[in-house]
Image (cartoon, helix red, strand yellow):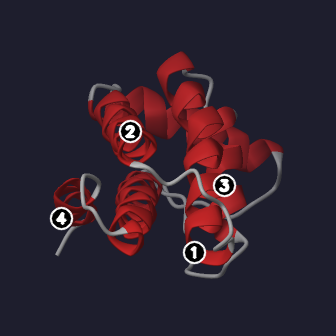
Amino acid sequence: MTGRDFLTFAKTLYASEQEAARRTSVSRAYYALYHIVREHLISSGIPITTKPEEHQRMVRYLKNSGIDNVKYVGEHMNDIREKRNNADYELSDSSFNKNTCTLYCSMAETLINQLDIVDKQSFKDGLIKYAKLVNEPYNL
């Protein structure tokens, strides 16, 4: 099982006639992105736990990586997370139509693709530099 499996599953749900399925598509799209970002950070030497506060910490690392594509991912990861929170917790939110859910799944896929093209060594170097700056643990 990988984060990409969540994205594949999300794509099967976003055009559903059932609102619960469309909401689930947004949630799974976010978690596809989350797991891929987490994997990239861990493989670059940044330890990431499964604690709830790690979502924001991951975004903070992306935004401070020193790489424009990665900063872009961090900035928009929050947008998808907010929509995921609404999907899971704000049942009165009526915005979960097919177009909106398709958009958020596409956004997650675009952000994942942005991470895929980043030079791994530059990414790692930027993350380690930031970890040192904020005095957080890292592995070389």
Question: How far apart are labels 4 and 3 at the CA level?
Answer: 21 Å
Earlier sequence position, callout 2 versus callout 4: 4
What type is the residue that disc 4 sits on? Asp
- Could you say whether the residue bearing mark 4 is in a helix, strand or loop? helix
Give residue 108's position: percent from left, percent from top: 39, 43
For mark 3, what is the residue?
Answer: 82
Instruction: Please name the residue shown 74% across and 47% down the image.
Output: 132
Instruction: Answer few, some or many: residues within 10 Å of disc 2's Cα (few below 14, many 20 plus, some between 14 and 19).
Output: few
Depth check, mark 2 against mark 4: the one in front is 2
Earlier sequence position, callout 1 versus callout 4: 4
The reply to whether dot 4 and dot 3 touch (C-beta < 8 Å) is no
Instruction: Please name the residue shown 57% across and 50% down the image.
Output: 95
For mark 4, what is the residue?
Answer: 5
Location of residue 50 (image quadrant): bottom right
- Could you say whether the residue bearing mark 3 is in a helix, strand or loop? helix
For mark 1, what is the residue?
Answer: 88
Depth check, mark 4 against mark 3: the one in front is 3
What type is the residue that disc 3 sits on? Glu
Instruction: Please name the residue shown 45% across and 42% down the image.
Output: 100
